Amino acid sequence: MVLSGYQANAPATPPGDVAQPFEFSPGDSLSFFGSIALEVWPAASLSLSQTGGPPGTELTTTGTGFAPTETVAIYVNHIAGVPLLTTTTGATGAFTVNAREPQTPYGPMDFYAVGLTSGKLGAASFFVTPAMVMTPHTGAPGATLMAQGVGFGAGEAVDIYWDEPRQLLGTATANGAGTSSSAIIIPSNASRGPNAVLGVGQTTNATGFGEVVVK
């Protein structure tokens, strides 16, 4: 959530200021101890070149409304720790920079851009979808390949299928980042040329696609 401003009231006047006292149990009086404070950031704008895709997708990230020539840190999902990248705005307080979506599990994620001088904040949303990466991406029937799934649900089982004719090649388990890895064998009845390999998440029901060129 990005707020462009707020009006603070005296704590005694509902809804009051951004930090309110509450009565906690055990206890018989109002106290600020344990209350929640809302940090308000001046608003800037952040946009992405697309709204969804698998990990590794290259995104063009555009920000406006920051201070001129200030450093902007771009974070993923939370504003803490090491940023995904940093960049510098131009004379108009805008920037455009390319970044690859990091390894994250299936579902919505947020990008945050924070001006380190102005304290301004821009936010944009992205939806992570799965994909299958085959190594190597070519082989003859009977050859063993590594099928890596990315963008699946954290900890979910991923069934791996050869598309035509449809057959189950194995099952892998995704880690906390939604990434799985499993050795598969090209079926003996696979047709020559490009063939699709599918990963189907057993919790999310999301499907990721990869390709193998059969020699």
Image: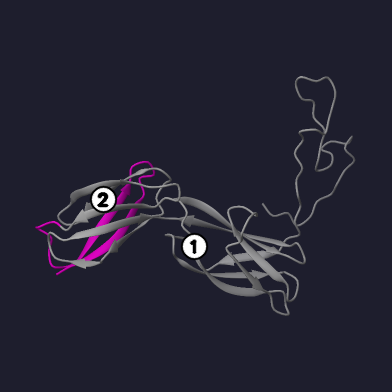
Q: Residue at x 12, y 61 (%)?
A: 141
Instruction: Name the residue located 14 percent from the left edge and 70 percent from the top edge.
Output: 215
Q: Position of residue 90 (x, y in %)?
A: 69, 78
Hey, what amino acid is under mark 1?
A: Glu
Eyeballing the image, is 65 above or below 201? below
Q: Is residue 69 left or right of residue 56?
A: right
Which residue is at 80% across, 43% downward?
A: 18
| Residue 123 on the magenta span | no
Instruction: Determine if the magenta segment contains residue 212.
Output: yes
Residue shown at 79%/55% (left/top)? 5
Question: Where does the image place residue 61, in percent across and percent down from the top left?
Answer: 57, 69
On residue 101, the disc is 1
Q: Give the x, y percent position of residue 7.
A: 84, 49
Helix or strand or loop: what does disc 2 sit on? strand
Q: Residue 19, labelled with which disc?
A: none
Q: Which residue is mark 2?
A: 160
Quadrant hosting residue 2: bottom right
x and y, in percent, of residue 154 in the image: 43, 45
**Apparent side of residue 82 relative to residue 39 in the rendered image (left or right):** left
In this view of the protein, which residue sits in the foreground, 193 or 177? 177
Task: Report the span colored magenta.
Answer: 187-215
Q: Is residue 190 placed above or below 60 in the rendered structure?
A: above
